[in-house]
Image: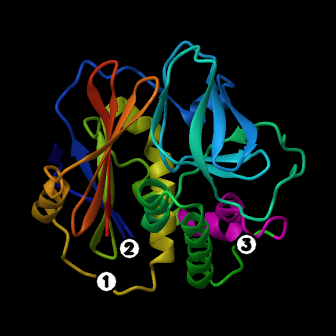
Amino acid sequence: MKILEHPSTALNLTAWFVSVPPGDKIPNYTVLEEAMESQTGLVHETGDVNELLIENTGETDLFIQAGDIVKGGRQDRTLGADFIVPAKSGKVPVPVFCVESARWHKRREESDACFSTSTDFAASKSLRAALRSKKSQGDVWQSVAEDQDKLCASIQAVTKSEESPTSLQLSYEMKEVTAALDDYLAGLESTPTAEAAGVVWAINGKLSHADIYGGPVLFRKVWKKLLRAAAREAIGERSQPSSEGSSDVGTATKWLEEARLTPAEEENLPPRTQLSSRRSKSQLRFETMDTQIQAQIHLSILAQ
């Protein structure tokens, strides 16, 4: 991995783009947002808060990632782990967490048997840590409430939908929240270079989190979803003091390598996903391997 020299900044959010060695093994995965839009990725309600069924009817393998939010069903959910769903998979169970605590029924014209879209991603480090490290529904709900409160305080407007105040997805869709995103999107949306395969984020000058993929094609597919999530976290942190000058290429490079050699906890999710998690004093590190091609396709790092 190599951090590209010149970061891009919008307000209190800085992006350091990362390149990786060329890898001819990485397939052209479909990602969840485009699969649901084309209706080749079907997400079915099960009636179990912490499990859904995903069906890939397409000809291309599907990559979904922890933090992807699916809207609809009986409650909005977020994926609890990275997962590879092979082409023509049939219905495959996947772990999820609820990001809407009060609803257990049909909402408006949405189906309560399946989910309609996946346009957004869990924004904050605390929420992503609750999903991937703590794996606690209670901690997820607490993080959702804290994220909503931070947005409300920063924007100085109500950021909870009257229709379902506990829905994180509906908070993200509030016009006040989308308006606050504009300056971040204008400053960063078109900035990744052709060789970029991932991004390291700094908020208020302090390293926050990173997502690095097996190649530039996969990164470009998830870039806008990652950007919107990072911008929402930055909005919620605007009242915090800045750490001006604390992030540069050297510190970011060192941070990326920090927990690489610490002992790993491994988990296999059939049919072909292997997850490894590592922990150090200042970060959580999650690695996802496609066991069919024996290649790492996603590295996620969260500062603690």
Q: Which residue is mark 1?
A: 242
Mark 1 and mark 3: Cα distance apart in space: 27 Å
- Secondary structure at badge 1 equals loop
Q: Which mark is residue 160?
A: 3
CB under 8 Å between discs 1 and 2: yes
Q: Which quarter of the image is occupied by the N terminus?
A: top left
Mark 3 closeness class: few <14, some 14–19, many ≥20 residues within 10 Å: many
Q: Are marks 1 and 3 in contact (CB under 8 Å)?
A: no
Q: Residues within 10 Å of mark 1 (few under 14, many from 20)?
A: some
Span of residues in magenta: 162-181
- Residue at image location 52% in from the left, 66% down from the top: 232
Between 11 and 260, the residue placed more toward the observer is 260
Q: Quadrant of residue 172?
A: bottom right
**Position in image of residue 192 (x %, y %):** 33, 45
Mark 2 neighbour density, 10 Å: few (under 14) some (14–19) many (20 or more): some
Nearest to N terminus: mark 3 or mark 2: 2
Helix, strand or loop for disc 2: loop
